[in-house]
Amino acid sequence: MSSVRSFEAGDIGTVADLFQRLLRKTDAPASADLKSYLGTLFLNNESLRTGLTSRVHVRDDGTVAAFLGVLPVEMEFEGRRLLAANCGSFVSDDRDPDPFAGARLLREVLSGPQDLSFSETANEISTEMWRGARASVLGPYSLEWLRILKPSAFALEAVAGRLPFARAARPLARLADAVLCRRREKPVWFHYRPLPGKADSFVAVPASDDAFIAAFLKFAQAFALRPRWEPPMLEAMLRHARRKAFHGERVQHLVKARSGAVVGAYLYYGNAGGVGRTVQLLAAPGQESVVIDCLIRNAYERGLVAIRGRTLPPLLPAMVGKKCAFVHGAATIVHTRDPALLEAMTAGKAFINGLVGEGWTRLIGDRFE
């Protein structure tokens, strides 16, 4: 009879192969690097201490059919210490004849000791499973914003994944963008040109991990429901986040006023000619517009063709007028039996997504040798 149990060291090889075939879309054997990383991420002292462990669904013959990775997150709300389950990595063998394996796996995880559970990477199938368990989709957290900087180069990059030879047309794209961007005196949605504004009174400077952590802890205080992390935890997460081979160079900046006061911070990845991916964007209340402008300008100056990121409700009003497009890629979805927590999350008062998610791990954006 099939069953659900905690993820164990002996499962790593099978789960790594599922990752390769179902998420990386390759039949190549899983590397020792990937196997080691899965163990580091999901079999650690924090999981044992909190009792929040990842789960596997096991077939009648004892083989693993599905995996749901769980990362414990300590949070706080109105002076209360909470335990959250970040349920990100989900793989289920598409050759398994049991159509309810994933649903049983999720129900087992949701029955754990945590105060709330969430995922920021739920696709359509996962979203329906969560909804079946009476979870709620957080619409304002489930959008991605996209700012096109160089339209011709962006269009070329969008098709280059399927048509690699298209990159040979990059010189023509640069010429077309130079013509399109000429003599524009106001922002338009299909390209970007730096214009004088309030952001000129601020500067974006490279940030050490210590400085970025200090900014994170400061600006997270604006949220009623937020992570309760000490610097060592964030230091470990940023070490994980150093490698994003598929996403490009890491850019970690503070945004400062002329007085030296820190008003925001951002962490994104991207190379010249590519699309940047923002992992975290932080701003002091009232300074969201300035920090967004500094991020977009930095991406443009580094030669990126577009920059994208996940929304946070306090940032949405500041993005009005920035000529950003909004699209839905994956849902942020939450499950809790506490009405006060659910109300805070649906009201946009929760700090989730970004580092309070799965985006800092190497599983998103990195290559395993």
Image (spheres, rainbow, N blue to C red):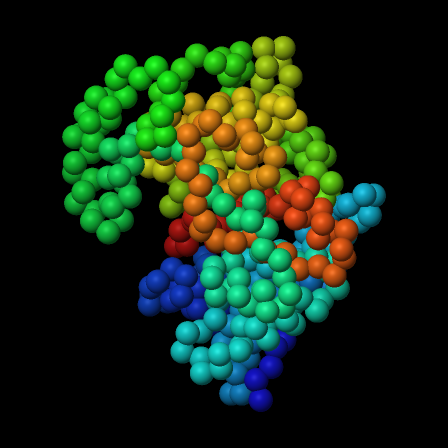
Find residue 254 and report its image quarter: top right
Q: Residue at x 67, y 44 (%)?
A: 347
Q: Is residue 360 depicted above or below 46 in this figure?
A: above
Q: Is residue 320 depicted above or below 328 in this figure?
A: above
Give the percent coordinates (x, y) of residue 361: 53, 49
Q: Residue at x 58, y 40 (%)?
A: 312
Q: Residue at x 17, y 45 (%)?
A: 165
Q: How many marks?
A: 0
Q: Is residue 60 visible?
A: yes
Which sits in the foreground, 130 or 166?
Answer: 130
Give the percent coordinates (x, y) of residue 13: 48, 70
Which sits in the foreground, 43 or 187?
Answer: 187
Q: Residue furthest right?
A: 79
Give the percent coordinates (x, y) of residue 153: 26, 34
Find residue 154 and report its image quarter: top left
Q: Residue at x 54, y 24 (%)?
A: 289
In the displayed structure image, the side of residue 270 where residue 163 appears, left or right: left
Give the percent coordinates (x, y) of residue 37: 52, 57
Q: Is residue 240 visible?
A: no
In the displayed structure image, the side of residue 9 where residue 184 appears, left or right: left
Q: Is residue 271 depicted above or below 116 in this figure?
A: above
Please identify the quadrant where the N terminus is shown: bottom right
Which sits in the foreground, 323 or 301?
Answer: 323
Please identify the quadrant where the C terminus is shown: bottom left
Find residue 175 and report its image quarter: top left
Q: Is residue 262 depicted above or below 26 in this figure?
A: above
